[in-house]
Image (tube, rainbow, N blue to C red):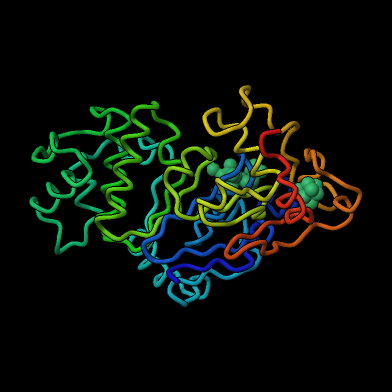
Amino acid sequence: MLLEIRDLKVGYKVDGMLTEVVRGVDLEIRKGECVGLVGESGCGKTTVGLAITRLIPERKGKIISGRVLLEGRDLFGLDDEALRAVRGKRISYVFQEPFSSLNPVFTIYEQIKESLPEKKATDRAISEILKAVGLDEIAGRKKVYPHELSGGMQQRVMIAMAIASRPELLVLDEPTTALDVTVQKQILDLIMELKNKMDLSILFISHDLNMIFRAADRINVMYAGRIAEQGPKKDMVSKPLHPYTRGLIESIPCIGHRKKAFDAIEGRTPLFSDLPEGCKFHPRCRFRVEACMKEEPGLEQVSSGHTARCIRAKELLLNGAGKGR
Ligand SMILES: Nc1ncnc2c1ncn2[C@@H]1O[C@H](COP(=O)(O)OP(=O)(O)O)[C@@H](O)[C@H]1O
Ligand code: SF4
Ligand SMILES: [Mg+2]
């Protein structure tokens, strides 16, 4: 196991009160695997990604409890210096907005150079890494600034900087969300190519289940700060267990069973300051029964490696409910 997140809880301070937004997340990433983390905006995905290397801004938030183990070593137990040796080196990040992540006053050459280990920062290495991310046209040029590049090219630069240190884990947080559809596909293809070539492990965070289905080997669906369902991609596609996952799938026009998309899940995600009793999805769930409103269900294994947080998961699977309705 490369990375294990165990019972992670993170909160943010709002009006002087700490509100828990990641409410006990368990997640595992094996070597060479791309693990997807998907869910509607605001459910806590970015917070999970940031917490891995303790990147939660201290004044605004707090890691309440939990453990993050990198090859068995607890990252929350490291001092700041030891953590800096991991962050950006063994674990690298790529975020949604490439332009705001790049420094506008430095050249691409200088910024890539900075992200390479000092001894390895030769002109040749910089040129090679630019070629590896498909930026052959600027590979030999030293005076190119971020604003001269398109959004897609900027994101390629961010990916180049993230892989420069030869990390073991890449955390990609909505890496294609800010880009045009055609460019999204090119960036996704690049990520998949690099994953195979470099044997990278990836945590792929996105609100877009379609993107996650394309990228991930294993998928975690998140709802209201917890994992609602987790399993191998093929099982999640062919027999989704949680009503929320089913709703997300039905919202994808090409995979969904209904012609009309986007209304498969009615209602809105609840506020963390005002979560419903029992199953947090119950106000929106079309399979809700009385018992759903009493206690929040635990994550239970339904088939090998496939778990769901729903008291009716097994029964609904057996009945084939939600399929072709
Ligand atoms: N810096 C912050 N201060 C206060 N609340 C925050 C902060 N960042 C995120 N939140 C809140 O935490 C919740 C989870 O946010 P986030 O992890 O960004 O979700 P996602 O990435 O799934 O959209 C949201 O309700 C969001 O409003
Ligand atoms: S526990 Fe009940 S309300 Fe929650 S997802 Fe399952 S059926 Fe729906
Ligand atoms: Mg986010």
Answer whether residue 151 is visible to the viewer in this image. yes
The C terminus lies in which quarter of the figure? Answer: top right
229 above or below 27?
Answer: above
Q: Residue at x 46, y 73 (%)?
A: 79
Q: Residue furthest front?
A: 319
Image quarter for ligand 1? top right
182 relative to 1 in the view: left or right: left
65 relative to 17 in the view: left or right: left
Q: How many marks?
A: 0
Q: Residue at x 18, y 44 (%)?
A: 130
Q: Position of residue 289 (x, y in %)?
A: 88, 47
Quadrant assignment, res 137 = top left
Which of these two is toward me, 15 or 182?
182
Which of these two is toward me, 256 or 109?
256
Q: Residue at x 67, y 39 (%)?
A: 323
Which of these two is toward me, 70 or 301?
301
Answer whether residue 280 is visible to the viewer in this image. no
Q: Residue at x 47, y 67 (%)?
A: 3
296 relative to 46 in the view: left or right: right
267 above or below 114?
Answer: above
The N terminus lies in which quarter of the figure? Answer: bottom left
Q: Position of residue 112 (x, y in %)?
A: 22, 48
Q: Residue furthest top?
A: 260
Q: Position of residue 44 (x, y in %)?
A: 61, 49
Which of these two is toward me, 298 or 157?
298
Q: Position of residue 172 (x, y in %)?
A: 42, 48
